[in-house]
Image (cartoon, rainbow, N blue to C red):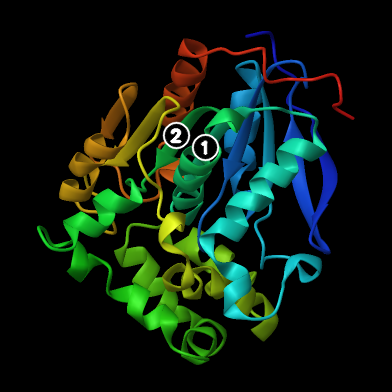
Amino acid sequence: MCAGDSSTKLIRFERDGLRFTAFEFGDPEAEPIILLHGFPESAQDFHPLGEALAAAGCYVLIPEVRGREPLARPKGRLAYRLDEYAADVIALLSRRGLDSAHIVGHDLGGAVAWLVASSNPSRVRTMTSISMPHPRAYLASLLSSKQAFQSWYLLLMQLPFLPELLVMWTPALVEVILSRMGLDADLARKYLRRLKSFDSAVGAINWYRGLPLGRRSDVAGPISPPASLIWGSCDAVVSKRAAELTNEWSGASYTFTCLEGGSHWLVEQRLEEVTRSIVSIVGAHPNDVGATDARN
């Protein structure tokens, strides 16, 4: 990889009438990485990781996922199926003239990354999930561990209006919940402030509401690109069993990194270690074939 340029640029891309924003870091001729944030994060919260990866010699794109911006906030739960998020990633690749890229996702962004890798393997150089096991491993762990108990909030998110009202009217309560999940209280407060309007809260929470509506094929299958999972041993959201079962669905080239004492929020709390892991994965699987001259 070549020396990086940590300057930030803003680009726009469109899909199905929706207009998205993505942040760009580093040299466009370097190894490309797409970073996908989760909930309740936004693309801005991944800027430190984008800057660190650019400084290490990577070209980084961080899109704001659907629902988080007014011009990319469709109506109805069906518009928030996981395959729609995966298609948005492919649209970003095409916008930047990239045949393929390294896909990295945290939390629900990790679920999107798994699906992109299974449904569009030719567009994925490597796939790295942070704090999100393979979806089939996650489902299997519901019956063989405490994962079902740890996933109680998924049911809450399916209720109409109540999650939005909790975020808007009782942010202190939601802050406590996020803190018990391991997120720093100041960061939880910062994230929740971005969801203070009803529309913004709906757009973010609909990511969860779309999960049960996906087609069976939307649940990521076996992965052929090199895959990696970075997981914290003190993750209060994802069980050890789910992390361990991921090996069964991740193909021959799979790397598991356990950060001892790490919570669910590894990007925020263990930035240097996460950066080193991603750089190592990207460096082990360079691929210049995917880039075209169409970057603009």
**Nearer the observer, 190 or 75:** 75
> Is 291 left, or right, of 49 in this rendering?
right
Label 1, label 2: how many angstroms apart (C-alpha)? 5 Å
Q: Residues within 10 Å of mark 1 (few under 14, many from 20)?
A: many
Residue 104's tag is 1
Q: How crowded is mark 2: few (under 14 residues within 10 Å), some or many (20 or more)?
A: many
Q: Position of residue 73 (x, y in %)?
A: 72, 71
218 lies above or below 51: below
Q: Position of residue 269 (x, y in %)?
A: 42, 43
Q: Where is residue 179 in the image (x, y as percent from the top left)?
A: 36, 65
Dot 1 and dot 2 residues touching (CB under 8 Å):
yes
Identity of the residue drawn at 40% across and 61% down = 216
**Outermost right residue:** 296
Identity of the residue drawn at 18% across and 62% down = 142
Going by the numbered disc 1, the residue's amino acid type is: Val
Going by the numbered disc 2, the residue's amino acid type is: Thr
Residue at the spot of label 2: 128
